[in-house]
Amino acid sequence: MPQRLRCPTCQRAIEWSDQFPFRPFCSERCRLIDLGAWLSEKHAIPGNPAAGPDETATDVNEPHEQ
């Protein structure tokens, strides 16, 4: 029996099967809504900010000289 789960976007109940090719989303629309949320930074994984193009990983923790 296929596993049942809910679409992360609209909470519609779906099965983990070939009937839902966009799983874990119920449709391409819900998949694109989720992608848009990540791209607009409405969704984010918490952590330290990434080093910018002018910084290296070691520069982030060291005080800047003036």
Image (cartoon, helix red, strand yellow):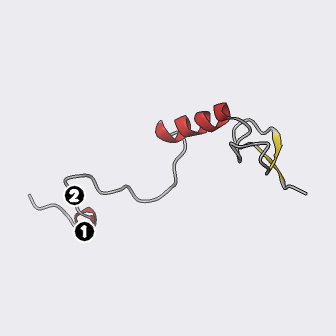
Q: Which element is circle 2 on?
A: loop
Residue at coordinates 70% horizontally, 35% vertically from top-left? 27
**Front position in the image: 14 or 44:** 14
**Front position in the image: 37 or 13:** 13
- What whole-number distance in Å separates the C-alpha atoms at marks 1 and 2? 8 Å
Check residue 58 in the rendering and tell me which mark sits there, or answer none.
1
Determine whether 4 is above or below 35 in the image.
Answer: below
Q: Please identify the quadrant where the N terminus is shown.
A: bottom right
Check residue 23 in the rendering and tell me which mark sits there, or answer none.
none
Three-letter amino acid code at the position of disc 1: Thr
Q: Count of labels shown?
A: 2
Q: Which residue is mark 2?
A: 55
Residue 9 appears at what percent x and percent y? Answer: 69, 38
Residue at coordinates 20% horizontally, 64% vertically from top-left? 63
Residue 42 as seen in the image, left or right of residue 3: left
Residue 15 appears at what percent x and percent y? Answer: 83, 48
Residue at coordinates 53% horizontally, 35% vertically from top-left? 36
Residue 12 as seen in the image, left or right of residue 27: right
Q: Which element is circle 1 on?
A: helix
**Front position in the image: 8 or 17:** 17
Three-letter amino acid code at the position of disc 2: Glu
